[in-house]
Image (cartoon, grey):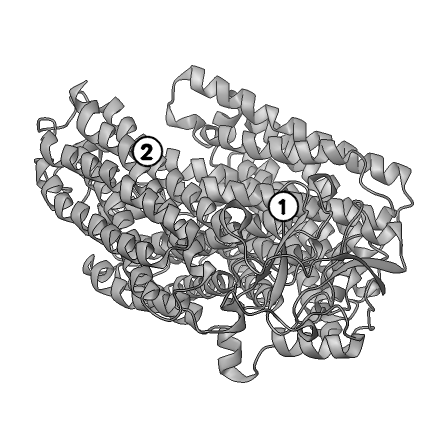
Amino acid sequence: MREAVVVDVSHLTRHCDGSASPAWWGTLAFMLIEGTGFALAVVIYLYLMSLAPVWPIGVGPPDLGAGTVMTVLLAVSLIPNLLVSRWAGQQEMRKVRLGLIVMSFFGIAPLVVRIFEFPAMHLQWDQNAYGSVVWLLLGLHTTHILTDLVETLVLTCLMFTRHGDNPRRFGDVSDNAMYWNFVVATWIPIYVCIYWVPRL
Amino acid sequence: MTAIAPDRDTRDSHLAEVELQRHLSTTWGSASGVWGALSNVDHKVIGRRYIVTAFVFLALGGALSLAMRLQLSQPEARFIGPDRYNQIFTMHGTNMMFLFAVPVMEAMAVYLVPLMVGTRNIAFPRLNAFSYWMFLAGGILLWVAFAIDTGPDVGWFAYVPLAGPQYGTGKRADIWAQMITFTEISALAVSLELVVTIFKQRAPGMSLNRIPLFVWSMLVTSFLVILAMPAIMIASTSLILDRLVGTHFFNPAEGGDVLLWQHLFWFFGHPEVYIIFLPAVGMVSTIVATFTQRPVFGYLAMVMALITTGVLAFGLWVHHMFVAGLPRLGESFFTASSMAIALPAGLQIFCWLATIWWGRPIFKTPFLFVLGFIFTFVIGGMTGVMVASVPFDTQVHDTYFVVAHFHYVLVGGALFPLLGAIYYWFPKFTGRMMSERLGKWVFGLIVVGFNLTFFPMHILGLQGMPRRIYTYQPEMLWGGLNMFISLSVLILTAGFLLFFIDVVRSAFHGRPAGANPWRASTLEWATPSPPPCYNFQRVPVVSDSVPLWSDGEVLSVASGLRVDRRELLVTGVVDASPEARESSPGHSVWPFWTALATTIVLIWSIFTPWAVVWGAIPVAIALTGWFWPKGTPEDES
């Protein structure tokens, strides 16, 4: 088939950021998958609650302390997270490196708090269905914190290597920050579900 | 890196055709040998592997159905015992749904969508390679388990409490649940790639109203996968947790609920039907357009019907649970929605009929399969409306009437269009035509064999023959029809054997096809058959929905892409205006290692929860290896 050149694209950039980039859409689609998973886990919680004569089954509501500390901690983490994202947009290497180190700590700290959240439920996963579903919710969310932490640590190391100074890497940092926002956002309904719904 | 300005020489603008092809082949080509095969990320290579593997599973699943028909051919037959029979019907359903129907549709899209939207590779090609290895591993897990008498025996939907820890002893149900994890990871990955490919990599000018209908159908399907499959992943994970670490999600004695399983399963399971059916709808639209040589009547109505079907698909799941004792108001709602989904399906049928009416039908094999589809699917659709009614469903639930219904819908609604699609796109895949003479025989044997096999099952169901029984007594008087069905299966099998023979024969000795043997309108036919590794030597530019019909001799293209790195065009979501010359990741063996590490974790975790802890380490290492930059030109920005 004969070709007729009708468009010249040589002036276009060699990389695109934000909502123009496939990686951004990929992250969004991934968040949709994960978000559906979280929503269904919350639905399971509410479904089992609707069947139980008394809720929580066999124990009182969870202690509020650790969960609330977690909520505050995650909310505070949004500040450095937004800053890292902004610095990545401006391609400020020094600040991005610093921000990523800070965000690594903000990834580790919730894991420490989480250690105290499981006992605050007052029961094990294998005691009854209530125990199973709260452990499922906490477990699911912990997995997300953990995966984002590993990604942040790898990115932090990467930004200190020769590969770091590349708009593509700054784009990765932005996408990682977007994913952390998602990890924080999904915690809110889970927090309300686990800690406040039993108190209604 | 940003400071590097490419030489003019590295662009395709001023290169002569031969020189351009040489550069592109070097940049996009792959290494030979085992290593090259393991690291290949070309969507066509992965797509071909997917299709072949899925058809191998079709043949294996077909062999199981032959075994079942042998056992059921006469009353009180003793060919297969009850335990083995339970495994066989579970394997048949599981294999056909999770290892054939969904993957083969995704596979066709993996091969075709990037070509149809005019790009050089699928988005996230390494994830695509990973998804194939996961699919393959899940399939091998299931079949090896069956070979060592550990095949699941709890039905393809693994209802609790039968599949739970109390009744489902051993590892059979765990194999089923973990196979789900493998196939769902793979399907979710492909869906994500397709969504991004369709959103961001369409040829310049391919605005939303110019997207080929098959691509639209895959976009809707991908969203269905993304929203439905997490339900089955949560469900199967909960089941494994109940069985492995003693959670009580499905244990009524401790506040759990067995119906929770049914809700979760069917919240996925009903959209699953449309995940299989909608791609077939896209194939039918494509074939109808080509073999009537005119665009499909009612493009907008067709797209709206696809989207409506996708939305309604999530409001039907309870019609699988009409005999579970749910509130009557709920049942009425789901009856209404189940009947409502017949409207977009009917609309599409009428659009195809109008297209055929106004076109000049060319009765080649792909088109014959479309006609077979319309006839068979309408029957399946009508029994669908029947079982949507609660009183009727209560009578025929768990009988052979339902078996007949869903085979009419799935085989008639999806497998016939798929076979038509294979005949249609085979020339593109291989560069050779399949036999038209054999094709007509294949069509005749399969359509006649199918109807002779499955139509009598409606009658058997109305006579009260239950599903999933390994034998029946002579006094039930079901023997005659069952023998008839078992003999009819031989006709169906002959059709499939002939199809496989035709495929193998044509792959080596078929008539050379040329770029566009059917005079079709979509972009995959604008490039040679089989397409070169770079798909298009210059990225096509589109100004209407039938680019190859508007000017059959000249292809409008864009120039200015680099040839020394894998570069493709990123375009706007709505209007497909060019936004950037983005790179596409090259071959890598890391997706294979990651899939291997994930496979070890998933299989190990059937036996101990600690597998997740220790097994996560190699997965993390493999993922880091995957994403760590290698300093290739593709990494430049």
Left or right placement of residue B593 versus residue B523 in this view:
left
- The total of numbered circles placed on residues is 2
Regarding residue B480, the answer to whether it shows in the image is no
Q: Measuring 57% from the left and 43% from the top, which residue is drawn there? A: B221
Q: Measuring 51% from the left and 67% from the top, which residue is drawn there? A: B636
Q: Quadrant of residue A93?
A: bottom left
Q: Chain of mark 2?
A: B
Left or right placement of residue B320 versus residue B411 in this view:
left
> Residue B265 at what x, y percent from top left?
40, 39
> Residue A155 at what x, y percent from top left?
33, 60
Q: Chain of mark 1?
A: B
Which one is nearer the viewer's eye here, B546 or B303? B546
Q: Quadrant of residue B502?
A: bottom right
Left or right placement of residue A39 versus residue B131 in this view:
left
Q: Which residue is mark 2?
A: B260
Q: Closer to the N terminus: mark 1 or mark 2? A: 2
**B341 up-or-down from B158: above or below:** above
Q: Residue furthest top?
A: B329
> Residue A101 at what x, y percent from top left?
24, 56
Going by the numbered disc 1, the residue's amino acid type is Gly
Going by the numbered disc 2, the residue's amino acid type is Leu
> Residue B223 at what x, y percent from top left?
53, 41
Within 10 Å of the Cα at label 1, are there few (<14), some (14-19), or many (20+) other Cα atoms?
many
Q: Which residue is mark 1?
A: B572
**B268 up-or-down from B580: above or below:** above
Left or right placement of residue B565 versus residue B156 in this view:
right
Q: Measuring 55% from the left and 20% from the top, which residue is drawn there? A: B336
